[in-house]
Image (spheres, rainbow, N blue to C red):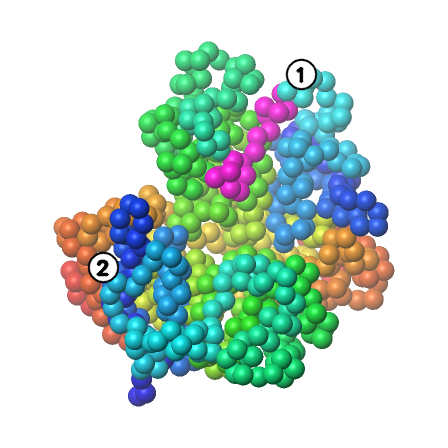
Amino acid sequence: MTAPLLEIEDLAVDATGSAGTVRILDGVSIGLGEGETLGVVGESGSGKSTLAAAIPRLLGPGLAISAGRMRLAGEDVMAMTPARLRRMRGAEVATILQDPLHSLTPWLRIGTQVAEPAVVHDRLSWKAAQARALDLLRGVWIPEPERRLRSYPHEMSGGMRQRVAGAVALSCAPRLLIADEPTTALDPTIQLQYLDLLKSLQREHGFALILITHDLGVVARTCQRVGVMYGGRFVEIGTTAEVMERPRHPYTRGLIASMPRLRSAGSRSDRLAIIPGQPPVPGQMPPGCRFHPRCAQRFEPCDRDSPPAFDLGSDRRVACWLERAFGT
Amino acid sequence: MTESQAMIGLDAVVKTYGRAPRIVHAVDGVSLRVDLGETLGIVGESGCGKSTLARMMLGLEPPTSGVMRVSGTDLRALDAGQRRRYRREVQAVFQDPYSSLNPRMRIASTLTEPLVVHRLYSANERRDRARAILERVGLPDDTLSRYPHEFSGGQRQRIAIARALILEPKLIVLDEPISALDVSIRAQVLNILADLRDAFGTGYVFIAHDLAAVATISDRIAVMYLGRIVEIGAAKDVAHDPAHPYTRMLFAAADPTAGTLPPQGEPPSPITPPAGCHFHSRCPFARPDCAAQAPALREVHGRLAACHYAESL
């Protein structure tokens, strides 16, 4: 077996501010093979977007990787020089963010923005890059791509802009695409189109995809594997089918049970299963297992010791003391 | 049911913005009724007019044309006293609990202010009522002396619901009340809304783009597309057996197990909507006459749908 595309071991990210240092990510380990799709699910404050930014080492001010190892195709990401990092971002690891109004430059024509990475990273002439941009726009199903090259971002719909962001991301044929809530700002029917586009682009170009989302439905449609984050850690990792159908961590189980279902339409007396309380805020993490204050199944070790990720085989890991107590 | 039981009745209501030639028909001839105590869900993509409809029901925007009735009386014909009563009986909860609560007011003032405005109860009774309503939405007593910034999004939305509820309204219009909340908090708020409805008999107009959430809480669902209602009926019928091609597309998109073909195209501009049936440009079943003639809402399998070919799809 060849080395996986991405290996992350025990990654920790700290935020330093006037109130001191707060750990945002803690002991995060995950691997990803070439061409694989991993969904990362979590609520606000779970650390999922911090993870998305940490991989290409694009953490914002005040945030820093404080521990752990990251390897991209065997190469130590932590040891990369600034020049190597620039090349890695964009050409090898590309990112799509939630709101393309922020990631696209408002006063530059679409053609310029889609062509630019090829000029910077692949040393193409602007003319050749424009030709590639046209192909890229066609590739992300933009109607009338010739005309759209001359458009500005504000002249396009949100769904169209997000496709342009996809074209920018793919312009240098990255091996890994990180999409952070790419469909959250889009209408449901447009969301579905976009996920379909991502899957089809992946089949065509073969990149690996990390899809960060709060929406388990998006993961179920798109990803082979899923990692569920809570309080800055992965609490459960496995194939999407396994995790969705047989969730083991009480948080994952609660999350899936609390989703409203279309089939329960119009029954007034029904209530949803709920997880009591609210997600913890970084800096105020409970001791032990971070989910224990909301967990109906907590027992003796939970408020004291943080559970390790128990390996249940076939790529399934669950960070819950129940796995130790009941065996596997 | 008779017309007199309708809390709110809309008859061919139109709301336009802008001036010719760039007129947006945000709401384009909508007729519907919200009965006392019922929950009507309104769904549709952005720009379909659902929020404009909500604002008109709240009296925040007058219709450009058409008639809106409150408990059977034309809104324009209400006298000052009736208008005050309508403002008390119809309350609102909006999407963003960060901007809908005054950051400089303690929760006690936020909750009792509606009672003060309507000159209800003594100061002590007002405080008792605020305490009682907080308990109903699952927040502790000491909430009263705190400020909004001390609460999470989910807690703030509970406070906003408590504020809407304190006047004992007959109807609460909720415009995307859960979309800004974390997934595990959405179910909590949906359950609270269902419990409050049982306890007080309050009706809801529930607007959201989360179709499963709308289906769960609604008795009836109205589906809007480019300012028009394309289907309206019992939640079960609309969610499980949609009659209109657009409803089918929308609900297939919401069902992760559906594995259906992704929908085609994007919603056209509401400034230049397609002629005839607005949906024909994206409809997989469209025939030539769909572009020529706009279909009227008519009964199809026990609900209303606006499609020439609803029966033969």
Quadrant assignment, res B71:
top right
Separation of marks 2 and 1 at Cα, in angstroms: 61 Å
A171 displayed left or right of A273: right
B166 displayed left or right of B151: right
Q: Residue at x 40, y 81 (%)?
A: A34
Location of residue A31 with respect to A51 vertically, above or below:
below
Query: For the residue marked with disc 2, what is the amino acid?
Result: Cys
The one nearer the camera, B234 or B274, is B274
The one nearer the camera, A133 or A276, is A133
Quarter containing the N terminus of chain A: bottom left
- Magenta stretch, residue numbers: B85-100
A74 displayed left or right of A138: left
Image x and y of residue B175, in percent = 57, 41
Crowdedness near tag 2: few (<14), some (14–19) or many (≥20) residues, C-alpha within 10 Å? many
Image x and y of residue B163, in percent = 49, 29
Residue position marked by numbered label 2 in the rendering = A320
Q: Chain of mark 2?
A: A
Q: Residue at x 36, y 25 (%)?
A: B145
Residue position marked by numbered label 1 in the rendering = B81
Q: Residue at x 48, y 39 (%)?
A: B97
